Image (cartoon, grey):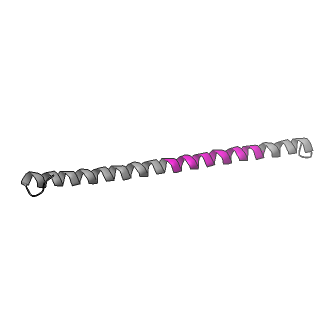
Amino acid sequence: MKDNVELLAKSIKKKDKMKSQSKKKWSERVEAEEKRKDDKQKKRNANIKKKKNEKKEHKLNKLAKKGKFIV
């Protein structure tokens, strides 16, 4: 078996194919992870911006209610 060239070539080809499939799956995984990370960061920034605006509005409304600021 070990000296059969056809079987050796076939096993090498199979090994290379498995390697390329594994590499492809890994690259897809890395891309998906990057996308998920970017989406989370965008959502976080949006939430921080929203919270900041809400605080600002609340403060202005509070000042307007006291008569120190005209809206």
In front of the other: 46 or 9: 46
In front of the other: 26 or 65: 65
Horizontal arrangement in the rendering, residue 47 relative to residue 16 (left or right): left
Magenta segment range? 15-35
The residue at the far front in this view is 70
Q: Quadrant of residue 67?
A: bottom left
Residue 71: x, y in percent?
16, 52
Identity of the residue drawn at 92% across and 46% down: 3
Identity of the residue drawn at 28% across and 51% down: 51
- Magenta segment, principal secondary structure? helix
Total labels: the figure holds 0
* Magenta stretch contains residue 31: yes
Identity of the residue drawn at 87% across and 45% down: 9
The residue at the far bottom in this view is 68
Quadrant of image for the N terminus: top right
Horizontal arrangement in the rendering, residue 24 relative to residue 42 (left or right): right
Horizontal arrangement in the rendering, residue 12 relative to residue 22 (left or right): right
* Magenta stretch contains residue 22: yes
Residue 25: x, y in percent?
64, 44
Horizontal arrangement in the rendering, residue 60 relative to residue 6 (left or right): left
Can I make out residue 2 in this image?
yes
Identity of the residue drawn at 37% across and 53% down: 45
Residue 34: x, y in percent?
52, 51
In front of the other: 43 or 54: 54
Can I make out residue 4 in this image?
no
